[in-house]
Image: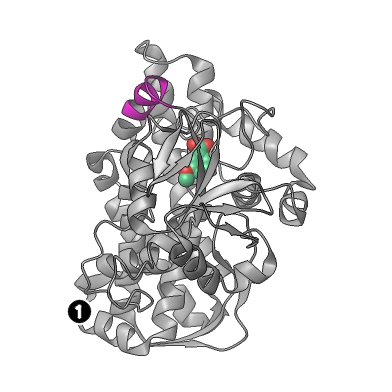
Amino acid sequence: MIPALDIDPFCKAFFDDPYPAHAAMRDAGPVVYLTQYDVHAVARYNDVRAMLLDWGSYTSARGVGISDFAKEKPWRLPSLLLETDPPLHDRTRKLMDKVLSPAAVRGLREAFADAAELLIDDLLARGTFDAVRDLAEAYPLTVFPDAVGMPAENRRFLLPYGNMVFNSFGPRNSFFEAAVADAEPVLAWVQAQSKRDALSTTGFGAAIHAAVDDGDIAEAEAEVLVRSLLTAGVDTTVNGLCAAVYCLARFPAAFEQLRADPSLARAAFEEAIRLESPVQTFFRTTTRDVTIGGEMVPEGTKILMFLGAANRDPRRWDQADTFDMTRRNAGHVGFGAGIHACVGAVLARMEGELVLAALARKVSRLEITGEPKRRYNNTLRGMASLPMRMVAG
Ligand code: OVM
């Protein structure tokens, strides 16, 4: 028997405190049925990881949201990376792996480091600020569009666009409706920015379009792949940085540890990703009758993977709910796993490392000075506002 639970993982109360519900799903069994949405779910580390690795049994091509592309028209043209299986996936992924390679990312390191230093100096001069708007959003919104080769105008549109797409993986609830209320200009802008002529001749965007000349992909495909960068390259990092700053501000001993050894910056960012899991969930769809922990789940079933619950599963992690930047956190699924594992992780980790290293070297005190406000999104976990004071030293 697969346990049936009436948990709603797409409502305000759940987003405010998902952890009791995560535990209830993990403890109920390896696979559960969520009555409110007629979907199955996995929340234990081992089952989430196994599902991420078995793309043959759990397809992404029917969408990685609650909507089944075999039954409903997709909300937007499907991604050629995220919402595909091999062999198409492998062709596009190979190109994106090359565009976002460690060597390509390394070439940006100095510019990204300078931007991080400048940002923290500026925030120290101000003293008080909002760590969401002025730090977590400000940094990726500067460095990432530059790296893609985008023009300077309207870059903030990347935030509402990410908010729309990540909400669209959930049900058509009030969060989704609010996010798409004024979609038209943002969608038009994103589409325009994906075109070759809109992008500089250097940068990730140009590198994707160059593959058209080599005959590797079609022009229209290049535009959809650039769109993937614009979709997944900002909001995710914003919430990762927000998670890291929020952790360091709440755990002063951890911040002291980081100040004493700024080379822990990379590990601190990684631990924040494990603990807060900015991308909380994705769906898969079964391609055949499968067994999960001895329970049969039929072909064509939507299964919700709780990455955030897996990353705090006490079956896998000691002191799972504690922020500990010295723990061995390799193997967390905050960036996914398997063929769809985050293609931009090298870049995201560098951004996190550089911002946290600048904080560690320049700041002596991090203090939350007002009520943190949560941002509600069907997929992303993050904050809308985090009032903060920083002291130099
Ligand atoms: C894409 C895409 C969109 C959202 C998320 C994502 C986390 C990728 O358009 O390819 O990965």
Asked where in the image residue 264 lies, by quadrant, the reply is bottom left
Image x and y of residue 70, in percent: 61, 25
Residue labelled 1 has its Cβ within 8 Å of some atom of ligand 1: no
Q: Amino acid at mark 1?
A: Asp
Q: Is residue 230 visible?
A: no
Binning the other alpha carbons within 10 Å of mark 1 as few (below 14), some (14 to 19) or many (20 upward) gives few
Question: Would residue 114 appear left or right of 225 to someone viewing this image?
Answer: left
Where does the magenta region start and end?
Answer: 85-94
Q: Nearer the viewer, residue 358 or 175?
A: 175
Can residue 149 be spotted in the picture? yes
Residue 45 position within the rendered picture, expressed as x and y whole percent measured from the top left: 35, 58
Indicate whether 276 appears above or below 4. below
Q: Is residue 211 above or below residue 259?
A: above
Residue drawn 47% across the image and 88% down it: 367
Where residue 153 appears, x then y in whole percent?
62, 45
Location of residue 90 (image quadrant): top left
Front residue of this view, candidates 90 and 227: 90
Q: Which residue is mark 1?
A: 261
Coloring applied to the structure: one colour
Q: Characterize the magenta stretch by its predominant secondary structure.
A: helix
Pick whichever, 259 or 316, lies toward us.
316
- Side (left or right) of 30 relative to 72: left
